[in-house]
Amino acid sequence: MMKAVNLVLLLALFPGPGVAADFSDPDWPCIQRKVENLSAGLMWPHPVTKTDLSPEAEELAAVLALRRVSLEEAEIHVRDFVAKHPSDEQMLGSVFQSVFDRLSENRKRLMSGIARYSQSQIALSARIDADRIEMAKLSAEKAPDFDRIDKLEEEMDWNERIYLDRSRALTYVCETPVLIEKRAYAIAQILLKHLPK
């Protein structure tokens, strides 16, 4: 009995991913919890004073921020940079801050896009519902306007197809901000490995 109580308490403390959803914001259609801003301090454990980066360090930050650059490639870029440019904690911290700022900006734009995407889906759903209601009214008339009914049916089919295609893409769209967060953390870990001992 005690094990069962402990299990229930444990599950209450650590809810699953489905519980994280917050549907109070209609502009956020994702299951993942909406987190507006990331914190660089949670990823980089050392104080960072924002300094101007050398052109080479700025180029490194730009490359590390590119999501198409794999983490293995990022590791090679950092290793090559550190071999050519003796770096300290402050410089690598500034590189991370530059990467973090770029990724955060991309993430903000993406989240704005998700909000527009959600608004578009809500509007499309309302249009489909309105067409259904109009079609039902027209069908119930004594002399139905079959041309109008056919046109509504065609529009509904098209709009439903668009709605479903967008809904299927939603999983990928919603995972992208999380992937950006993970990349920022992974880049921090790569840079931290190269701090002078």
Image (cartoon, rainbow, N blue to C red):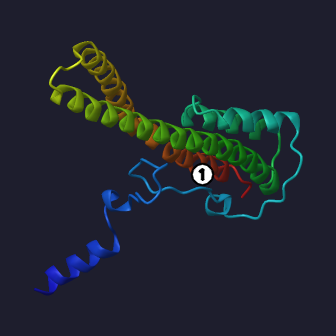
Viewer-side residue, 17 vs 69: 17
- In this image, 9 relative to 113: left or right? left
Residue at which label 1 appears: 189
User: For residue 131, what is the image quadrant?
Assistant: top left
Instruction: Please tell me whether residue 1 is drawn above or below residue 18 in the rendered image.
Output: below
Q: Position of residue 94 (x, y in %)?
A: 79, 50
Within-10-Å neighbours for mark 1: few <14, some 14–19, many 20+:
some
The residue furthest top is 147
Instruction: Please tell me whether residue 69 is drawn above or below residue 21 in the rendered image.
Output: above
Instruction: Name the residue rendered at 35%, 30% in the picture.
Output: 163
Viewer-side residue, 13 vs 34: 34
Quarter of the image that includes the N terminus: bottom left
Quarter of the image that includes the C terminus: bottom right
Check disc 1 and give the amino acid type: Gln
Instruction: Please tell me whether residue 36 is drawn above or below residue 128 in the rendered image.
Output: below
Q: Secondary structure at mark 1?
A: helix
Viewer-side residue, 178 vs 191: 178
Instruction: Name the residue rendered at 56%, 38% in the picture.
Output: 113
The residue furthest front is 142
Instruction: Name the residue rendered at 49%, 41% in the picture.
Output: 119
- In this image, 13 relative to 70: left or right? left
Instruction: Name the residue rendered at 22%, 15% in the picture.
Output: 146
Instruction: Please tell me whether residue 59 is drawn above or below residue 2 in the rendered image.
Output: above
Viewer-side residue, 14 vs 43: 14
Q: Position of residue 70 (x, y in %)?
A: 55, 32
Q: Count all numbered tags in the image, as a single digit.
A: 1
